[in-house]
Amino acid sequence: MDDKTSTGSKFDIGYFYDSNQVAVKHGRAHICHLGTSSIKIAQQLHVVIKEESPSLLNVLVSHWPSQLQTIAKDFRNKCSIGLRGFVETLMTDKKQVILMGDYNDEPYAHSLFKNMSATNDRDLVLSEPDYWLYNPYWKTLSARVPFSIDEQQHDFGTCYSKAGNRNTLSAFDQIIFSGDFLSSGPWYLEESATGVVLTDKIRAAIMNNKHCFDHMPVIGYIRKREATHVSV
């Protein structure tokens, strides 16, 4: 999805999919402005799941500015406010929405928790699913395996850093769901199958300076109430 902003900045997002299961149409590219800078908020995909009664999901994919940029916090704040506004229009029309990407912010950051109203509090989401978003990636902030003298490797987060001046692993990569994935929507979140893909091979590659990637894959799993399922 190589859309460009008015200043020529190019989105760096791509996707692949199983055409036997879904049809995908490229929707809007969302851009906002901060001074003379054009900021890439998200790109929209209309994902139609092929079944007897086809289902439409709105997927909004983002790659927000890196924390290495001095003004990046302002950019991410602007991105989140703009994205929240668009999400609200979709939820008002009773459309199921999935947000995903490298937000370069932790789940508890102001941009995601406050501006996007993306929480890990299921009771809160269920109390007002037309407003709150559910972010299951808060759970990646803590280790899945307790510390022991025999196992000292980290297994939390999604992004590895060698900087030495912040957490070695940060939870920048997230998949966030509109509240109806927990309540009355035709598709619901299967959280037990949603999380980070961290195998020994991936861990070794990320730690190896010969490789040029530092993010782990994340997976989201949704299931149709009639028992159809799909991974994103």
Image: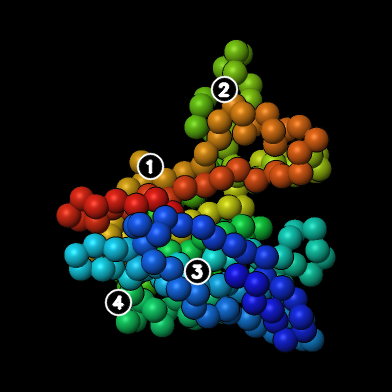
The disc label shown at residue 193, or none: 1
Q: SS class of the residue under badge 4?
A: loop
The residue wearing badge 2 is: 147
Q: Earlier in the sequence, mark 2 or mark 1?
A: 2
Which one is in front, 162 or 215? 215
Q: Gap between marks 3 and 4, in whole Å?
A: 16 Å
Camera-side mark, 2 or 3: 3
The disc labelled 1 sits on which kind of residue?
A: Ala
| Crowding near the residue tagged with mark 4, few <14, some 14–19, many ≥20 C-alpha atoms within 10 Å | few
Q: SS class of the residue under badge 2?
A: loop
Camera-side mark, 2 or 1: 1
Q: Is residue 160 above or below residue 96?
A: above
* Circles 1 and 3 in contact, beta carbons < 8 Å: no
Which one is in front, 151 or 12? 12
The disc labelled 4 sits on which kind of residue?
A: Lys
Counting from the top left corner in percent of width and height, residue 152 is at 63, 21
Q: Earlier in the sequence, mark 3 or mark 4?
A: 3
Camera-side mark, 3 or 4: 3
Q: Earlier in the sequence, mark 2 or mark 4?
A: 4
* Circles 2 and 1 in contact, beta carbons < 8 Å: no
Looking at the figure, which quarter contains the N terminus?
A: bottom right
The residue wearing badge 4 is: 94
Which residue is farthest front?
20
**How is the structure coloured here?**
rainbow
Counting from the top left corner in percent of width and height, residue 6 is at 72, 86
Q: Is residue 85 above or below residue 67?
A: below
The disc labelled 2 sits on which kind of residue?
A: Phe
The disc label shown at residue 60, or none: 3
Q: Earlier in the sequence, mark 1 or mark 3?
A: 3
